[in-house]
Image (tube, helix red, strand yellow):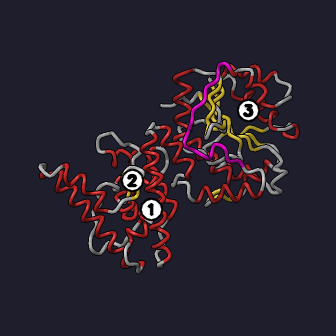
Amino acid sequence: MYSSRIIGLIVAAGYSSRMGTFKPLMPLGEKKVIETAVDSLRLGGINDIRVIVGYRAAELYPVLERLPVSIIENPNYASGMFSSIVAGVRALAAEAEAFMMLPGDTPLIRSSSIKELIKKYRQTGAAVVYPTFNGQRGHPPVISDKCFASILNGDGAGGLRHILEQFAADSVVVPVADQGVLMDMDTMDDYQQLAKFYAKRNIPTYDECLALLDKYQTGDKVLRHGQTVAAVAQQLVDLLNGAGLKLNSELVVAGGLLHDLAKGKPNHPRRGGRLVTSNGFSALAGIVAAHMDLELTAEQAIDEAAVLFLADKLVQGDRRVSLNERFNLPLAKFSENPEILAAVLRRQQTAEIIRDRITGLVGIGSLEKLVLR
């Protein structure tokens, strides 16, 4: 699907002076930072990946030689990052139609973002294609061969940004639900934030949820409903975790925000589950797919899917309601349709079972009164 003539260029030649330690070889999960950066491009469909080295190159070689990458040495790395980009473009210019430029300290790019950037480049043929998150441009841009001569002839003043500004009229942006496009690691605090983000990368942040809702144009009603469901779900998780359970709060809140991501489409719960998976949030798929109909056995523990199911049934529109109020309208509306009525009654019964089990677990008189308060 993706041309080998779009080359991935990872810049890992700098001093890491602000960090105080060599960034490319810092651990990130079970891998090094540089390995994670390579994975980001490779999983997004970039087959030809080249890493520019300079400072402490001898320490990088043993790691890079195990990876499916080529190595470009920049003997002028002391001159700054632009010199590394020039070295990279000089090495690939004869064979590439474009390159995707990724700083080695911005390693957490979702594969879905890489694919969207390449798709937009293929559609437009733009000189530069930038990813954006919350309206801010990030990495990695796709830079076409229209820019190569200007880069090679540049004097370095203003860096790559100054060169690319000359092509502003022939540039496009791609909004992505990917906070990682803005996350670099110049300082130890940046690194610690990046490590926390990496540990929970299969669950979207609140802002990533909003970006997904915007991407699929769900509308204000779905947003307000999701925000209220997320708030109720958070309240239920807090109660349960206070009683000794260990439920994932971030997972439930994200599920509340995104459970109606595919609202209005056929079988929207399953479709929503597929959408979140395709955007890199596989941990969320199950609870989104089960938010409307949930199979609950007597032995099954209360989990995040059960919490989201109940929270959704305690909200009508953007109002908190009792289960009776929530189900009165559909029960009356479908009273003459036995098949749909049976489904509504089944959902009501499941919600009541979950409510009663949570009430017993947390030891309160009325869960609904607490939620409605």
Eye-nearest disc, 2 or 1: 1
Name the residue at 48% across, 44% down. 279
Q: What residue did someone put label 1 on?
A: 233
Pick whichever of labels 1 and 3 is earlier in the sequence: 3
Residue 262, horizontal then vertical, whole percent: 38, 42
Eye-nearest disc, 2 or 3: 2
Name the residue at 43% across, 70% down. 370
* Residue type highlighted by circle 1: Ala
| Magenta extent | 169-184
Pick whichever of labels 2 and 3 is earlier in the sequence: 3
- Splitting the image into 4 quarters, where does residue 296 fall? bottom left
Q: Is residue 50 visible?
A: no
Q: Is residue 337 visible?
A: yes
Q: Is 92 left, or right, of 151 in this rendering? A: left
- Splitting the image into 4 quarters, where does residue 233 fall? bottom left
Eye-nearest disc, 1 or 3: 1
